[in-house]
């Protein structure tokens, strides 16, 4: 749980595989199949395919090794187990959860909106996948039929996804009337005092205040270190980038409100996924906090292991320079190990079933 050829005949086989992968109704029906259950809670083929990189279950992952599918399914099972355990403990009623929920809530709307567009517009057809498969085969004639088709599907879907996202963002910005107060941003870059409630950008009824930007900076140590330099050019670039990125989410949220997204099945699905992720992350923090800190001996052993694996050992940095960085890495491994043990105990105490036949056909 890590949060993880023969040219002529091959072309004929690829066409057959493509037709199977792109079968309309059967594909949609298969996405509804249950690949695993976690204490009575279903994980569908759609859940697994999306986690494996196929948006809205848009293509089969037949070319992916079974072990990789199992590893990713284990991650999904771990998230469900952690979320269920967290809810049973009441972690979703804590202030920590409410703060994390609020921080991620705007992303739910954007995710749901993009999901709705993908369901309507993301389609694969045999001709375009076949063309991409042939392109892949020119570079690697030994690639298997299934793997070539998987790579082709991923490439095409990736391109279509970017196009759909771009058009959606453009429509949202236009319809919500996105605007920026460049004078206020200029004042901030010069170190001039402006109120926390100064509006730096807006999209419909959504507004980005100076206090919002300061919160983002203070919550991110790397950004805070740049901001504290008080360099006008760096500050202007930093604030402008934050505002530009945040206004995309704000415009999508305002756009979604105008188009009645809240309460839709897409919104409910995105909300549920976010809730599970937030609870699972909080559970990881809570459970892994009991891990012992890395000793000097363990850090030294990690350093020696890494040096041993290097081809040119003379390039290894001095131990003293990387000691504390390695300590944090070892601490991370120990926290992960404690959490994995916790999840394994939950799995043993609960009822987890996996449909191996469905898993193979993902």
Image (cartoon, grey):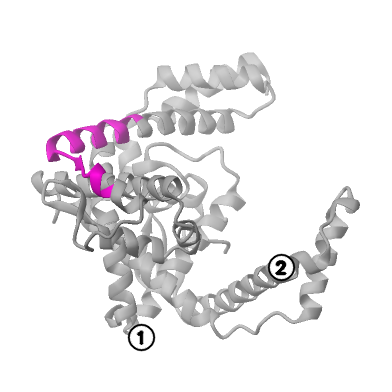
Q: In the figure, is residue 293 to the left or right of 40?
A: right
For label 2, count other residues whose C-alpha is less than 10 Å away and answer few (under 14), some (14-19) or many (20+). some
Q: Residue at x 32, y 53 (%)?
A: 188
182 in magenta: yes
Residue 134 percent across, percent down from the top left: 55, 17
259 in magenta: no
Residue placed most toward the observer, 114 or 355: 114
Q: Residue at x 29, y 50 (%)?
A: 187
State yes or no: discs 2 and 1 in contact (Cβ < 8 Å).
no
Q: Residue at x 45, y 44 (%)?
A: 53
Q: Secondary structure at mark 2?
A: helix
**Can you say which quadrant of the picture contains the N terminus?**
bottom right
When the figure is inspected, residue 277 is found, relative to residue 288, above or below; the finding is above
Q: Secondary structure at mark 1?
A: loop
Tell me which numbered mark, 2 or 1, is placed earlier along the sequence: 1
Q: Residues under labels 2 and 1: Cα distance?
A: 34 Å
When the figure is inspected, residue 144 is found, relative to residue 285, above or below; the finding is above
Residue placed most toward the observer, 73 or 204: 204
Disc ID at residue 326: 2
Q: Residue at x 61, y 52 (%)?
A: 67
Q: Which residue is mark 1?
A: 89
When the figure is inspected, residue 71 is found, relative to residue 58, above or below; the finding is below
Residue 32 percent across, percent down from the top left: 32, 49
When the figure is inspected, residue 228 is found, relative to residue 337, above or below; the finding is above
Q: In the figure, is residue 87 to the left or right of 256?
A: right
Q: Quadrant of residue 339?
A: bottom right
Q: In the figure, is residue 150 to the left or right of 25?
A: right
Residue placed most toward the observer, 193 or 223: 193
Magenta residues (range): 163-185
């Amino acid at each position: 749980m890590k949060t993880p050829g023969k040219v002529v005949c091959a072309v004929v086989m690829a066409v057959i595989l493509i037709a199977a992968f792109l079968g309309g109704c059967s594909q949609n029906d298969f996405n509804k199949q249950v690949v695993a259950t976690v204490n009575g809670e279903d994980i569908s083929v759609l859940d697994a395919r999306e986690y494996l990189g196929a948006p809205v279950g848009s293509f089969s992952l037949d070319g992916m090794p079974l072990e990789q599918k199992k590893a990713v399914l284990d991650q999904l099972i771990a998230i469900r187990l952690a979320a269920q355990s967290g809810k049973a403990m009441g972690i979703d009623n804590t202030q920590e959860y409410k703060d994390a929920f609020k921080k991620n809530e705007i992303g739910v709307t954007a995710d749901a909106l993009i999901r709705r567009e993908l369901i309507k517009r993301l389609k694969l057809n045999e001709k375009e996948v076949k063309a991409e498969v042939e392109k892949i085969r020119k570079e690697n004639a030994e690639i298997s039929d299934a793997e070539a088709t998987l790579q082709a599907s991923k490439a095409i879907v990736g391109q279509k996804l970017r196009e759909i996202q771009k058009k959606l963002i453009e429509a949202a910005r236009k319809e919500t009337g996105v605007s920026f107060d460049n004078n206020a941003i200029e004042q901030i870059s010069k170190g001039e005092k402006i109120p926390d409630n100064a509006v730096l950008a807006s999209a419909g009824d959504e507004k980005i205040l100076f206090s919002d930007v300061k919160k983002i900076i203070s919550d991110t140590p790397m950004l805070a270190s740049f901001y504290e330099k008080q360099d006008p050019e760096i500050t202007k670039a930093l604030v402008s980038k934050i505002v530009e990125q945040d206004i995309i989410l704000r415009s999508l949220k305002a756009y979604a409100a105008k188009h009645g997204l809240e309460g839709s099945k897409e919104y409910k699905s995105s909300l549920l996924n976010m809730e599970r992720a937030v609870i699972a992350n909080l559970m990881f923090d809570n459970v892994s906090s009991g891990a012992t800190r890395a000793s000097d001996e363990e850090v030294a052993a990690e350093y020696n292991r890494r040096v041993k694996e290097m081809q040119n050992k003379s390039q290894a940095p001095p131990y003293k320079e990387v000691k504390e960085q390695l300590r944090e890495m070892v601490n991370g491994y120990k926290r992960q190990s404690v959490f994995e043990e916790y999840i394994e105990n939950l799995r043993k105490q609960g009822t987890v079933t996996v449909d191996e036949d469905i898993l193979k056909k993902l």
